């Protein structure tokens, strides 16, 4: 199961610089002019998880395989993108394909890097992007409502239910409320999800600050953080310039020393990756053996049989049970054998709701 975060924002806010650092490649151009990114660039990023190293040590695993999230660098949107301005229509289609958005907001002053509007105003930048996404969603809904209304008039119960949902979302968008902020009932949620609305996607706001503001932020990032808090979202301060430098250091000790000299404990990229993981509602279960210790990403609420299916469909089809040890018990008892001897290994059935950090061995028969 793949999960993708799309990196978006206005032109020249540091999206591609951040993406380059994120993937530790130079596959995305980072030039000082709008629309330098024409096609989205993709990078598969390992999710940092210190638990893997610990269980690999106890299981004598030959290799470690972390779970991953894909990041997509989407070209800069401009005002009027929903009507095709710039390269808008193409970019909006790319946004529709991702699961969550990483909205990079310019929070630094630099006369050598032009801003598309000629001024540094992060809240105005956010409003521009949000407006274009809402306008695109309104256009999508208008087309659907026209089609569904005909069916609803013929007493089609499912069509009436769909029309009520479309009207709810439409009313919200018309007063400036993105779809993600609306209260959708549980029985309508699957229908809502299938609408694939741009403003329904969860957002992480990344304040791209100057190097001197990386640790504490600045007056611009404070505004973004306050805004994000008000819309129940996440905001992080990151210096794309610093992250670019860190990405060039292959030695972890050198990276740590460099970050420490700047008053930073961890890279901004690690924080973005983990925020993306969390905003997508993901947890991790682990498997461990002599060949490999591996992390697997699943949505919260996934059952044991469904988790087995992420490894192989045969595991889910022939599921018998899941031998399960919590990470804490695995470490405390120094591995699988110790956990078994102290009664900390449990046999869970197919409907068991997997917890983050569960170490699992699936028994199946096909």
Image: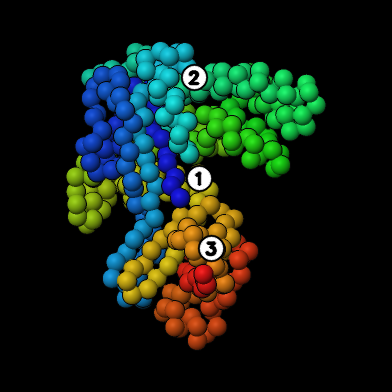
Q: Earlier in the sequence, mark 1 or mark 2?
A: 2
Q: Residues within 10 Å of mark 1 (few under 14, many from 20)?
A: many
- The percent coordinates of residue 181 (x first, y second) are 61, 32
What residue is drawn where x is 50% and y is 23%? 133
Judge from the rendering whether residue 309 lies leftward or rightward of residue 172; answer left or right: left
- The percent coordinates of residue 54 (x first, y second) are 36, 69
Q: Earlier in the sequence, mark 3 or mark 2?
A: 2
What residue is drawn where x is 30% and y is 20%? 35
Q: Earlier in the sequence, mark 3 or mark 1?
A: 1
Asked if the residue at tag 2 contacts the one at tag 3, i.e. Cβ–Cβ closer than 8 Å, the answer is no
Q: Residues within 10 Å of mark 2 (few under 14, many from 20)?
A: many
Spatial CA span between label 3 and label 1 = 23 Å
Q: State the residue in front, 205 or 313.
A: 313
Q: Is residue 326 visible?
A: no
What residue is drawn where x is 22% and y is 57%? 253
Q: Which residue is mark 3?
A: 316
Q: Which residue is mark 2?
A: 132
What residue is drawn where x is 39% and y is 33%? 7
- The percent coordinates of residue 222 (x first, y second) are 45, 32
């Amino acid at each position: 199961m793949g999960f993708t975060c799309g990196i978006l924002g206005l032109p020249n806010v540091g999206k591609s610089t951040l993406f380059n650092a994120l993937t530790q490649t130079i596959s995305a151009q980072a030039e000082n002019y709008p629309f330098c990114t024409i096609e989205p660039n993709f990078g598969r990023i390992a999710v940092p998880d210190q638990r893997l190293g610990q269980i690999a040590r106890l299981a004598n695993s030959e290799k470690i395989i972390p779970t991953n999230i894909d990041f997509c660098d989407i070209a800069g949107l401009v005002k009027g993108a929903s009507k095709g301005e710039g390269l808008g229509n193409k970019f909006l289609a790319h946004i529709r394909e991702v699961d969550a958005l990483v909205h990079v907001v310019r929070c630094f002053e630099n006369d050598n890097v032009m801003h598309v509007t000629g001024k540094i105003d992060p809240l105005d930048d956010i409003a521009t992007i949000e407006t274009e996404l809402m306008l695109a969603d309104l256009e999508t809904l208008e087309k659907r409502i026209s089609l569904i209304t005909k069916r609803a008039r013929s007493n089609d119960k499912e069509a009436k239910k769909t029309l009520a949902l479309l009207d709810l979302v439409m009313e919200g968008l018309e007063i400036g409320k993105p779809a993600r902020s609306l209260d959708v009932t549980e029985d309508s949620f699957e229908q809502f999800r299938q609408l694939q609305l741009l403003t329904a996607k969860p957002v992480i706001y990344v304040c791209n600050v100057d190097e001197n503001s990386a640790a504490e932020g600045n007056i611009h990032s404070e505004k973004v953080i306050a805004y994000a808090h008000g819309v129940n979202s996440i905001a992080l301060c990151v210096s794309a310039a610093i992250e670019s430098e860190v990405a060039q250091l292959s030695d972890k000790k050198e990276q740590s020393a460099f970050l420490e000299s700047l008053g930073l404990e961890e890279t901004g990229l690690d924080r973005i990756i983990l925020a993306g993981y969390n905003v997508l509602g993901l947890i991790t279960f682990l498997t461990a053996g002599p060949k490999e210790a591996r992390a697997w990403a699943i949505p919260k609420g996934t059952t044991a049989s469904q988790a087995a299916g992420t490894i192989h469909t045969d595991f889910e089809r022939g599921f018998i049970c899941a031998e399960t040890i919590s990470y804490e018990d695995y470490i405390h008892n120094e591995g699988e054998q110790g956990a078994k001897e102290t009664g900390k290994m449990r046999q869970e059935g197919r409907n068991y709701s997997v917890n983050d950090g569960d170490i699992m061995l699936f028994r199946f028969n096909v």
